[in-house]
Image (cartoon, helix red, strand yellow):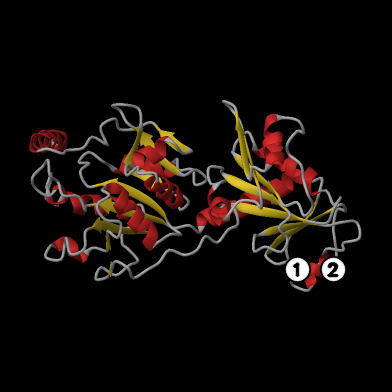
């Protein structure tokens, strides 16, 4: 798109908006499979997982209304549990497991499975999760659907090839037709992806101490670098914003562009990204720094084309050290929680979060696209090189 849907005269004022509550149980991409005992829920779920596990990292959560046992009696962890420990964790180099008394708290429910691409829930029929209803032989569960105690139903699954007189006008699948159900599950997740807007964010809120002049206002051509980056992103994103300090561009032509002012202060790029995600928590964010004079349409197009929305983020590896480049990255909505987790541990650099999160890491199509200019000498070299490249 070439124009923003937001008025140029509006900006995000600090403190005006609060992030919405997480509208999921365990994961933004989740489906609950609900049915009575012996209806075939577990068999159905495991068949789907088997089909999808080669392509995705999948979480599974079982809601057991009865007492369950996961430990082995006589083992060290079992002895610790029986002695009165209220939380027991066991780990080896490739696995870990935790047993809680009274179950995980709200924060752990909302965060513990975010590293997975999506989650299948078994049970949770009285929750607000979107559901696929697995019918028992007598279809007893339909009573709860009819009276509204089970809601958000996406589809029904049953033993027969078709089912008449269902209470809702939603798809029906024969439970052995796994391929059809698999395609439906993909379509549910893809619809969520397609309705998630991709916003652009140009980070301009830095103090440019090494350059000793504001890098956002530097000109490598006729326009300021902030303006060039804004127009670059706005040609690919649904809406685009400048990330800035409050009042930073009040007396500048950049002030006419949509702004998101920092509400997470003194945190560098991390603060700008978090402020944007707090202002629009349901959007994915394509974030770039304003000091990338070689950034081009080809690089941005490649990044968007190869985006994997189930991951925390999609980004390029550095040509210098092979690590993720956080300042040309698509941050998915769930990365907001991930960044806050690392911030709570004292890590202010988004690169640290990317290194330790499931991301889609790409090789740069233009090896110099993410070279930045932080000093006056680097600025002069970059400008000279760009002028040479611009000559016929």
The image shows residue 238, relative to residue 61, as above or below, that is below
Q: Secondary structure at mark 2?
A: loop
Q: 94 or 146, which is in the foreground? A: 94
Q: 17 or 382, which is in the foreground? A: 17
Identify the residue at image location x=88%, y=53%.
160
Mark 1 closeness class: few <14, some 14–19, many ≥20 residues within 10 Å: few
Identify the residue at image location x=31%, y=62%.
3
The location of residue 224, given as percent across then percent down, is: 14, 51
The location of residue 211, given as percent across then percent down, is: 10, 42
Q: Secondary structure at mark 1?
A: loop
The image shows residue 132, relative to residue 183, as above or below, that is below
Do we see residue 1 in this rendering? Answer: no
The location of residue 130, given as percent across then percent down, is: 65, 60
The image shows residue 375, relative to residue 276, as above or below, that is above
Mark 2 closeness class: few <14, some 14–19, many ≥20 residues within 10 Å: few
Identify the residue at image location x=83%, y=48%.
40
- Extreme residue in the bottom direction: 147
State which quarter of the image contains the N terminus.
bottom left
Q: Name the quadrant containing residue 106.
A: bottom right
Q: Name the quadrant containing residue 372.
A: top left
Q: Name the quadrant containing residue 356.
A: top left
- Extreme residue in the right direction: 138
Reading the image, the residue beneath label 2 is 165
The location of residue 332, given as percent across then percent down, is: 45, 49
Left or right of 98, for residue 203: left
Reading the image, the residue beneath label 1 is 168
Could you give the CA–CA distance between mark 1 and mark 2, rounded to whole angstroms?
Answer: 9 Å
């Amino acid at each position: 798109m070439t124009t923003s849907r937001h008025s140029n005269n509006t900006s995000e004022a600090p403190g005006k908006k609060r992030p919405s509550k997480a509208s999921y149980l365990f994961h933004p991409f989740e489906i609950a499979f609900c049915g009575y005992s012996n209806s075939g829920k577990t068999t159905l779920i495991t068949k789907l997982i088997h089909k999808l596990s080669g392509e995705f990292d999948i979480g599974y959560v079982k809601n057991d209304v009865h007492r369950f046992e996961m430990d082995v009696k006589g083992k060290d962890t079992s002895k610790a549990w029986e002695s009165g420990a209220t939380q027991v964790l066991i780990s080896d180099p490739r696995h870990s497991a935790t047993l809680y008394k009274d179950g995980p708290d709200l924060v752990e429910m909302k965060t513990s499975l975010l590293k997975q691409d999506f989650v299948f829930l078994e049970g949770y029929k009285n929750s607000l999760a979107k559901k696929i209803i697995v019918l028992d032989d007598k279809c007893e569960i339909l009573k709860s659907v009819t009276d509204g105690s089970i809601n958000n139903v996406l589809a029904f699954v049953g033993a027969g090839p078709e089912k008449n007189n269902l209470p809702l006008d939603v798809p029906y699948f024969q439970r052995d037709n796994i391929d059809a159900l698999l395609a439906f599950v993909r379509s549910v997740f893809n619809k969520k992806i397609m309705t998630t807007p991709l916003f652009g964010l140009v980070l301009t809120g830095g103090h440019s101490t090494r350059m000793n002049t504001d890098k956002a206002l530097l000109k490598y051509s006729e326009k300021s670098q902030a303006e060039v980056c804004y127009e670059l992103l706005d040609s690919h994103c649904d809406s685009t914003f400048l990330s800035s300090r409050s009042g930073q561009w009040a007396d500048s032509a950049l002030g006419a562009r949509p702004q998101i002012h920092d509400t997470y202060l003194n945190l560098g790029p991390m603060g700008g990204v978090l402020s944007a995600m707090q202002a629009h928590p349901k959007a994915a964010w394509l974030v770039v720094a304003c000091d990338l004079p070689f950034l081009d349409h080809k690089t941005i197009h490649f990044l968007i084309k190869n985006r994997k929305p189930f991951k925390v983020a999609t980004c390029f590896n550095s040509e210098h050290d092979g690590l993720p480049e956080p300042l040309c990255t698509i941050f998915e909505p769930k990365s907001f929680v991930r960044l806050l987790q690392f911030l709570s541990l004292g890590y202010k650099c988004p690169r640290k979060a990317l290194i330790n999160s499931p991301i889609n890491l790409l090789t740069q199509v233009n090896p110099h696209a993410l070279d930045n200019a932080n000093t006056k000498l680097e600025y002069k070299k970059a400008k000279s090189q760009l002028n040479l490249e611009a000559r016929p």
